[in-house]
């Protein structure tokens, strides 16, 4: 069974690139959300193996999404990878304090994104030689 990755991104073009990395390059299953509210609903419903989370979202921001997910039963061990154009050190620390396991700056390098997703999800099918 493919591992599930919830991609939370409000920019359609970036969301599609992330989907391509997850599904086409890594062989995992992608679920998409464009708002914080939608992300929380889908995460609780589907319990993904990884959440790739934009920090700047309309409505509920990514910091709040991460902290709210950490209060949900069973989400204490679910990795969260934050993607953000907020590149200051204090923003990265705030993301980690909210519950994100790692932070990747936008614009991101595709290889760096693939490596971080693969590491956090514990290996996708195509990177395990399957």
Image: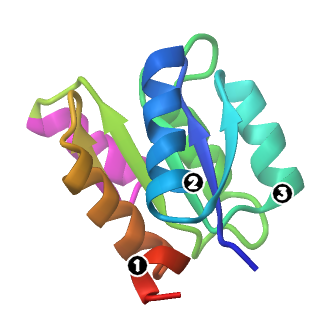
Label 3 neighbourhood size at 10 Å, few (<14), some (14-19), many (20+)? few
State whether residue 66 appears in this view.
Answer: yes
Residue 27 location, quadrant: bottom right
- The residue at the point 75 percent across, 59 percent down is 72
Distance CA(mark 3)–CA(mark 2): 17 Å
| SS category of the residue bearing label 2 | helix
- In the image, residue 39 above or below residue 100: above
Q: Name the dominant secondary structure of the magenta segment.
A: helix
User: Which label sits on residue 23?
Assistant: 2
Any part of residue 124 in sight: no
Work out which residue is located at the far right of the displayed protein and give it: 45
Asked if the residue under mark 3 is in contact with the one under mark 1, i.e. CB atoms within 8 Å, the reply is no
- Taking the spot 77% from the left edge, 62% from the top edge, the residue there is 47
Q: In the rendered structure, find residue 46 and report the number of the disc placed on it.
A: 3
- The disc, 1 or 3, on the residue closer to the chain's N-terminal end is 3
Labels 3 & 2 near each other (Cβ < 8 A): no
């Amino acid at each position: 069974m493919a591992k599930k990755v919830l991609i939370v991104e409000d920019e359609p073009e970036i969301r599609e690139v992330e989907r391509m990395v997850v599904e086409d390059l890594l062989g995992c299953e992608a679920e998409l959300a464009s708002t914080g509210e939608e992300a929380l609903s889908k995460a609780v419903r589907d319990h993904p193996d990884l959440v790739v989370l934009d920090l700047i979202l309309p409505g509920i921001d990514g910091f709040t999404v991460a902290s709210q997910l950490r209060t949900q039963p069973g989400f204490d061990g679910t990795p969260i990878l934050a993607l953000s154009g907020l590149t200051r050190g204090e923003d990265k620390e705030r993301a980690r304090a909210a519950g994100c396991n790692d932070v990747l700056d936008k614009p991101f390098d595709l290889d760096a994104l693939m490596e971080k997703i693969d590491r956090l999800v514990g290996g996708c099918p195509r990177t395990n030689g399957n």
